[in-house]
Image: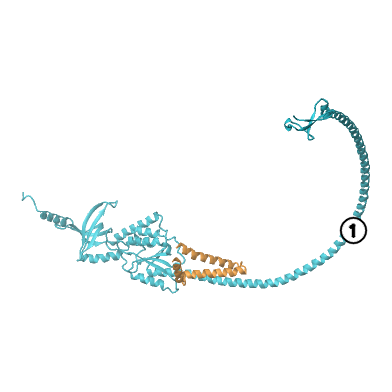
Amino acid sequence: MENESITLCELLLTVRKEIANTFSDAYWIRAEISEIRENANGHCYLELIEKDSSGKLIVAKSRASIWADTYKILKPYFVKETGQELKPGMKLMVQVSVSFHEVYGFNCTIRDIEPTFTLGDLAKKRLETIKQLHDDGIWDMNQSLELPMPLNRIAIITSSTAAGYGDFIDQLQNNKSGFKFKTRLFPAIMQGDGAAESIIEALDTVYEIHEKYDAVAIIRGGGSTTDLLAYDEYELAASCAQFPLPIITGIGHDRDQSVVDMVANIRCKTPTAVAAFIIDQMDETANHLLDLEETMKQQISDNLEMARKRLKEGAVNFSQRINLLLKEEEQTIERDQINFKHVVSLLLMKQKQELKDSSLKVSQRLSLLLKEEKQAVERSQSNFLHIISLLMMKQKQELNVKRDQFKTAVKNQFSEEKHELAMHEKSVQFLSPDYILKKGYTLTLKDGKAVKSQAELKSGDLITSVFIDGKKESIIK
Amino acid sequence: MAKKESTYKDSILELESIIKDLEENQLEIDDLAAKAKRATELIKFCKEKLYGTESEVNKILEDLDKE
């Protein structure tokens, strides 16, 4: 069995030999960098991959290396041509030779590189980003913002360590016109990995207090012009495009404009240019104000001059006009006087005639009235006498009737009285003591007073009995 | 931002309208004096915004108000 098998090394050596024979040429391949690192010896180790059309699935993967003596030539060449460092995600066209090592396995050794391919790919991505911004309808949002007047409160996004920042501030604060600027630094990483995220974060911070600022300056002072891919990234460009304050860029690269530059309200090449632009704006604002001030002063003095002139002309006109008016008035009065006299005499005459007419009418009317009145009085007089005599006659008749009635009544009264009197006489007769005594009754007196009860009497009392024909005294037993 | 901008802008607009009135020579002498005074105030305000000559003082006053 041992004789029928070979060792791993023997197998891999065979593969190595076979590959070296079959793939002896160099091949231009297209691939994407998924990993890259340099070691201390100056060698560069990469992992190259290829993805399917969806960009998600890896369909090929291989180790690759650029040996130090090649790398030290290729690297600066690539950076010079593309403005970019080699980094993950980047698409490359490289010339490779393949080899197989029994310990290290399959490896592509990179011998040459074609930067234009990478450039093309970057340009394609950039175009896609631009198209996306257009499609989202945000492309010209920041560009359409009006620059505020005055433009003197500036939020600055830059690296706090950059020397350019200090120069920028100096330039603003020491402007020749003496404008006052209010600035604040919002620090961010301005290039390389994480730059886009860092700048977006700074923008978010400014956004919280954006009412306090007129504009945002995104500046990058000095340093290498490589690794500015962040400024073509969709997220950062979209944040800038939608920012509510005008964005002024001074990113400082000499390649084409970045997408951020394109969506910004104002793009300048360098921070210095940004500061100059801002000062220019302020100068323009100040000049406009100065113009207005001059115009105003001129206009006020013009107006005053005009008013003075008007006053003078007015005075002359006034006296002329017054004279004219006075003359006219005089004439009018004269005319009126004549008219008045005429009218008055006419009126007087008319009045006189009317007076005459009316006095005649009045006397006629008066005599008529008097006559009527007299007749009326006469009529009433005779009426009155007639009524009086009638009334008197009636009164007389009534009096006669009353007198007869009275006579009869008196007569009747007399006869009634007589009768009643006779009746009374009779009653009195029956009641008199004589009438009673006559009938046999006696009246008993004691001491001259009538005794009405036997109790009043005791033995020995002297009483007097009165009879119709005299008295008899007796003593009680 | 809106606030400050509109204040400066409003001042400029008012100033321009005053100048327009002046150019039309429509003003009575009393109005003229009033407008001149107003325009001077506006210009002072705008210069203040540009050069901030009094802003320090105003800031101190504002701070005092807050306390």
Chain B colour is orange
- Rendering coords of residue B53 (x, y %): 46, 72
What residue is disc 1 on? A352
SS at circle 1: helix
In front: A19, or A239?
Answer: A239
Q: Is residue B49 above or below residue A348?
A: below
Q: Quadrant of residue A195?
A: bottom left
Chain A colour is cyan
Q: Is residue A474 above or below residue A18?
A: above
Drawn side of residue A98 relative to residue A407, left or right: left
In front: A462, or B35?
Answer: A462
Residue furthest out toward the top: A439
Drawn side of residue A411 relative to residue A137, left or right: right
Q: Quadrant of residue A438?
A: top right
**Amino acid type indicated by mark 1:** Lys
- Rendering coords of residue A235 (x, y %): 35, 58
Q: Which residue corresponds to the image point at 47% horizontal and 66% vertical from the top-left?
A: A149
In front: A137, or A245?
Answer: A245
- Rendering coords of residue A84 (x, y %): 30, 63
**Subunit that carries the residue with mark 1:** A
- Rendering coords of residue A266 (x, y %): 41, 64
Residue A313 in view: yes
Q: How many marks?
A: 1
Drawn side of residue B55 relative to residue A55, left or right: right
* Quadrant in which the C terminus of chain A is drawn: top right
In front: A144, or A208?
Answer: A208
What's the image's color scheme? by chain
